[in-house]
Each structure stands twice: as structure tokens, then as C-alpha cells.
């Protein structure tokens, strides 16, 4: 009887540990989400509302439509992350933006909007200005990589559209971002 009870307790503790491990998020030493090779972050965030100029993200056979928002998300990466109170581009951001520039040059008829975002700390006004500086940094870099500035629009949402709700370093890191949206 004691052996069964001990075995049951051990199994329960193992299941609890497995549950917590499976739900953990990967971050670098600065608390920023880790971006995988496919451009999507490990935090599970994706973007795109399923529409692009009236077109869906996938074709009739379930494949991603070339030049769509989903194509950008899946094959390139649609967002870059920033440090606290920063708008300079980190090496990881530059790698994603190089891929975005290549993708945008492949589809010269597409226009995009670059959204600047901030975490919840700071005033609304300050975060709107910070989001604008982040979006402008991304735009300027894409222009330096040969993308026409007439195809690029910027908007700042400041802290008004968090990707993750939560007053903690992991949530803040995912909210300090610029997101590229196909118009």
C-alpha cells in the first residue's frame, strides 16, 4: 500500500513539473522573446488578421499566398524587438529587417505600415513618441536596404495595443516591438 502511494505521489509531481516546463517561454538574457529561424517568436505570438487587400492568407489548397501578410509572418518574420526605452536596432532585429527588405524588394507593388509599440511603463504621450521612434528606425533601415520610402508608412500605438497583457519583464519585452503589416 505504501509503495502504491509513493508511486502515485511521484507520478503526480512528475506531471506537475512537466506541465510547468511545457508552458515556459524562451527568452534571452535581456528578457526579449527568442525568435526562431522561421521568424516567429517562441512566445506564440503571430500576427495577421487573415486579410490582405481583400485576399485571404492562404490559397485554396491551404498554401500561404506569396506576398501576403501570412507569407511575411511565416517565411520572413513580421516583428522586431527593442530594449527598454530604446529605439536602436539590435543585431537580431537587423537580421529580420534584412530578410524583410529582400522580401519587400521581391514584391515591389506592396505597401506596408510599420507599427511602433511600447510596454505599459511610462506615460501615454511618452510611449506614443517612443513607438514612433521605433517605427521610424525600422523604416529608415528598410530604406537604406533599397526599399522605396513611398511604400512605407509608420504609425505608433505606444502602449495602447499590447501583444501580451501582464506587468512583468517577459510581457514587457514582447510589447517593445515594431510590427510590419502588409496594406
Image: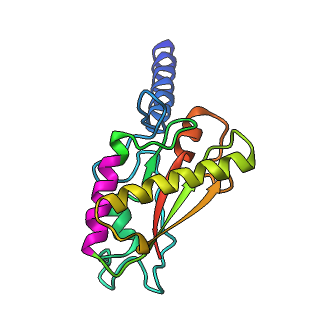
**The image quarter in which residue 147 lies:** bottom left
Q: At which x and y percent is residue 138?
A: 43, 55
Q: At which x and y percent is residue 108?
A: 30, 78
What residue is shown at x 29% (from left), y 76% (from top)? 107
Q: Is residue 75 visible?
A: no
Relative depth, front residue between 143 and 59:
143
Relative depth, front residue between 79 and 25:
79
* Image: 19 above or below 159: above
**The image quarter in which residue 101 lies:** bottom left
Figure colour scheme: rainbow
Q: At which x and y percent is residue 49?
A: 52, 71
Relative depth, front residue between 107 and 18:
107
What residue is shown at x 37% (from left), y 46% (from top)? 93
Q: Is residue 106 left or right of residue 113?
A: left
What residue is shown at x 51% (from left), y 27% (from top)? 12
What secondary structure prevails in the magenta region? helix
Q: At which x and y percent is residue 60?
A: 33, 85
How many numbered discs sit on the rendered protein? 0
**The magenta stretch spans which residues?**
94-106
* Image: 87 above or below 112: above
Q: Is residue 69 visible?
A: yes
* Image: 14 above or below 157: above
In the rendered structure, does residue 57 fall within the stretch colored magenta?
A: no
* Image: 116 above or below 53: above
Relative depth, front residue between 66 and 110:
110
Amino acid at each position: 500500500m505504501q509503495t502504491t502511494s509513493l508511486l502515485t505521489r511521484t507520478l503526480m509531481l512528475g506531471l506537475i513539473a512537466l506541465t510547468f516546463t511545457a508552458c515556459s517561454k524562451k527568452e534571452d538574457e535581456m528578457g526579449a522573446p527568442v525568435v526562431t529561424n522561421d521568424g516567429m517568436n517562441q512566445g506564440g505570438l503571430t500576427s495577421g488578421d487573415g486579410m490582405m487587400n481583400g485576399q485571404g492568407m492562404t490559397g485554396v489548397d491551404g498554401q500561404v499566398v506569396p506576398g501576403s501578410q501570412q507569407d511575411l509572418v511565416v517565411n520572413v518574420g513580421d516583428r522586431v524587438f527593442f530594449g527598454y526605452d530604446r529605439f536602436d536596432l539590435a543585431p537580431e532585429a537587423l537580421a529580420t529587417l534584412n530578410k524583410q527588405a529582400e522580401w519587400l524588394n521581391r514584391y515591389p507593388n506592396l505597401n506596408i505600415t510599420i507599427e511602433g509599440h511600447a510596454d505599459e511603463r511610462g506615460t501615454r504621450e511618452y510611449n506614443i513618441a517612443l513607438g514612433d521612434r521605433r517605427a521610424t528606425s525600422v523604416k529608415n533601415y528598410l530604406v537604406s536596404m533599397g526599399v522605396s520610402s513611398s511604400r512605407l508608412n509608420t504609425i505608433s500605438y505606444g502602449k495602447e495595443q499590447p501583444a501580451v497583457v501582464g506587468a512583468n519583464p517577459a510581457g514587457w519585452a514582447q510589447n517593445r516591438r515594431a510590427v510590419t503589416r502588409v496594406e
